Image: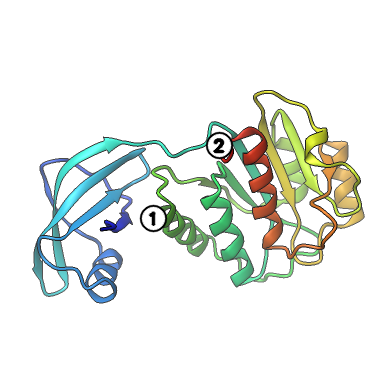
Amino acid sequence: MHTPRFFWDHTLTVGNDMILPGDVTHHLLHVLRMKEGDDITLFNGDGSEYRGTIASIDRSKVAVAISASESISRESELTSRLGLGILKRHAMESALTRATELGVSEITPLITSRTNVRNPRGIHWQQVIQSSCEQCGRNRLPVLQEIIPIEDWLAKTESAIKIVANPLSERVLNDLQSDTPSVSMLVGPEGGLSGQEIEGAEAEGFLSITLGKRVLRAETAPAALMSLVQYRWGDINQ
């Protein structure tokens, strides 16, 4: 039977009974309908999983007895940094979820010339990433950086290979050579990157690559690119 996993940004200690936070308690009681004696797994981003059992339920409070911890890494050896043009709400959620599932190391939301989002939701984006880690089994969260202009990110990001998704390019990923790379990837928002932004990326050492003959939606492109780099240099083909 699958044991539910919950992220809790809190120090977790084996041998202690701990009162769970409200959001975890609500999901545990009202969505999963769990009861005293049921097992759960907690993680806080330190790289370990903490096994626990529901010790008591008192109305809206749930105490969990943490019985054991184990350091379990499900991280790729590939360091991958994603610069992502800010997308509209559901598209952004989808892009963050898929990139997290596929093992991205770091995500930086970017303001581009075609960004059309008035109220970016950084706190909500962090919650999306946490939920994705709960589902996919990662015990370390990818880093969600602060929102910055695309020009600033291009100037400061450092990797062995730097890639910009460009549907007009004829270069494919297999044309790139590196044995143990770190990868920075630039993907635009709805409407794509402007020609000037692509030129600016190339001036900073980014290589334009195509993702195939079909035009991908803005939320699909990051997942496609992450899949390709993880297959080429990461852990998908292992």
* Quadrant the C terminus occupies: top right
| Rendering coords of residue 98 (x, y %) | 57, 56
**Residue type pointed to by label 2:** Asp
In the image, residue 129 sits, relative to residue 81, either above or below, namely: below
The crowding category of the residue bearing disc 1, from other C-alpha atoms within 10 Å (few below 14, some 14 to 19, many at least 20), is many
Left or right placement of residue 198 versus residue 179 in this view:
right
Q: Residue furthest top?
A: 179
Left or right placement of residue 53 versus residue 191 in this view:
left
**Residue type pointed to by label 1:** Glu
| Rendering coords of residue 236 (x, y %) | 57, 41
Q: Residue at x 52, y 36 (%)?
A: 76
- Mark 2 to mark 1: distance in Å? 19 Å
Left or right placement of residue 213 versus residue 125 in this view:
right
Q: Residue at x 27, y 50 (%)?
A: 42
Q: Residue at x 73, y 44 (%)?
A: 152
Q: Residue at x 24, y 67 (%)?
A: 25
The quadrant where residue 63 appears:
bottom left
Q: What sort of colour scheme is used for the picture?
A: rainbow
* In-front residue for pair 233/7: 233
Question: Which residue is label 2 attached to?
Answer: 235
The quadrant where residue 192 appears:
bottom right
Label annotation for residue 134: 1
* Quadrant the N terminus occupies: bottom left
Q: Earlier in the sequence, mark 2 or mark 1?
A: 1
| Rendering coords of residue 216 (x, y %) | 76, 62
Q: Nearer the viewer, mark 2 or mark 1?
A: 2
